[in-house]
Image (tube, helix red, strand yellow):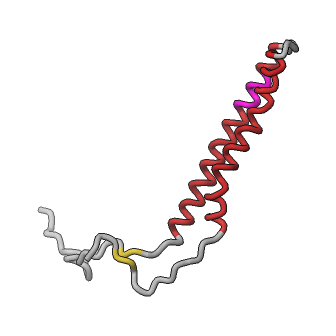
Amino acid sequence: MGIFNILPGYARTPPGRERVILRRMPLVFLVGTLIIGMPSLVVRLFHWLGIEQSPTLVTTIDVYAYSAFSFFWPACVLVTVGAFIVKLMKGPAYVADAYPLNDADAPRKLPPDD
């Protein structure tokens, strides 16, 4: 008897959209990060090329980029964890705890408190 015993008669659910999400999330994370970081990189590229930008503009773009990163990265993690949970739930059912209980039919009678 192994540690994990698959429940007999359980029909596996076919994979669905969660597999597509899990496969695409690394690319979505990378491309989204590059798109969000692009304005900040372009402002710095202008500085290297000798085109002067206002320091307020650079700071504003950096703050907006940081805010977008703060929203985008947790959203990616949330969607990935949700898809992983759905994938895990669609797997085979296992017998979780097959231990016999001593008082399975009724609770044990306690002695009266004196």
Q: Is residue 61 magenta?
A: yes
Write the residue at 29% across / 76% down: 98
Instruction: Give percent across and percent down for residue 66.
Output: 70, 30
Residue furthest to the right? 51
Instruction: Give percent across and percent down for residue 33.
Output: 70, 39
Which picture quadrant has residue 69? top right
| Residue 107 position (above or below residue 48) | below
Helix, strand or loop for the magenta stretch, by majority: helix
Residue furthest to the bottom? 9
| Residue 104 position (above or below residue 73) | below
Task: Please state the extent of the stretch shown in magenta in the rendering.
Answer: 60-66
Front residue of 108/40: it is 40
> How many marks do you count on the picture?
0
Write the residue at 35% across / 72% down: 96
Q: Report the side of 109 relative to 16 (left or right).
A: left
Q: Report the side of 27 relative to 48 (left or right).
A: left
Front residue of 43/107: it is 43
| Residue 47 position (above or below residue 98) | above
Q: Is residue 45 magenta?
A: no
Q: Report the side of 7 relative to 87 (left or right).
A: left
Instruction: Give percent across and percent down for residue 29.
Output: 67, 45
Q: Report the side of 44 relative to 101 (left or right).
A: right
In which quadrant will I find the C terminus?
A: bottom left
| Residue 76 position (above or below residue 34) | below
Instruction: Give percent across and percent down for residue 28.
Output: 70, 49
Write the residue at 46% across / 75% down: 92
